[in-house]
Amino acid sequence: MAIVRVVPMASVATAWFGSGEEITAEAGNLFQLVEQLERRSPGFAEAAGVAISFAVNGELAADWTVPLVNGAEILLVPRIGGG
């Protein structure tokens, strides 16, 4: 398991965590991170991947099974719908 820094963008923080402060979590991959964040904020797992994207160390993550490394920064970014 890796210790990672989770940085929610303002709208994600307001909707799910009540503040924009960084969250420290222990997870081996993004699936496990979502489980951790679900415990903090019930309902988060349902929004993850649908309304929220994840950027790991500055790159959007498409594969949630890739192992996370210690010290990784995970940015929680709201998805924006288009027409």
Image (cartoon, rainbow, N blue to C red):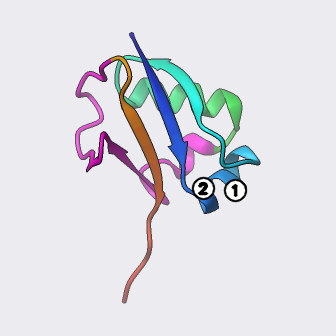
Above or below residue 15? Residue 61 is above
Q: Position of residue 24 (x, y in %)?
A: 56, 25
Q: Is residue 56 magenta?
A: yes
User: Relative to residue 60, is residue 79 drawn left or right?
Assistant: right
Query: Which region is colored magenta?
Result: 44-69
In this rendered view, identify the residue nearer to me: 18 or 63: 18
Question: How many residues crowd mark 1 within 10 Å: few (<14), some (14–19), many (20+)?
Answer: few
State how many labels appear: 2
Q: Position of residue 7 (x, y in %)?
A: 52, 43
What numbered label is drawn on residue 52?
none
Q: Disc 2 designates what residue?
A: 12
Above or below residue 63? Residue 5 is above
The reply to whether callout 1 and callout 2 are in contact (CB within 8 Å) is yes
Q: Position of residue 38 (x, y in %)?
A: 62, 33
Locate residue 81: give its quadrant.
bottom left
User: Relative to residue 14, is residue 67 drawn left or right?
Assistant: left
Label 2: element kind? helix
Q: Position of residue 68 (x, y in %)?
A: 31, 23
Locate residue 9: give its quadrant.
bottom right
Q: Is residue 11 magenta?
A: no
The type of residue carrying mark 2 is Val
At x 51% / y 36%, what residue is drawn?
A: 6
At x 44% / y 24%, what residue is drawn?
A: 4
Label 1: element kind? helix
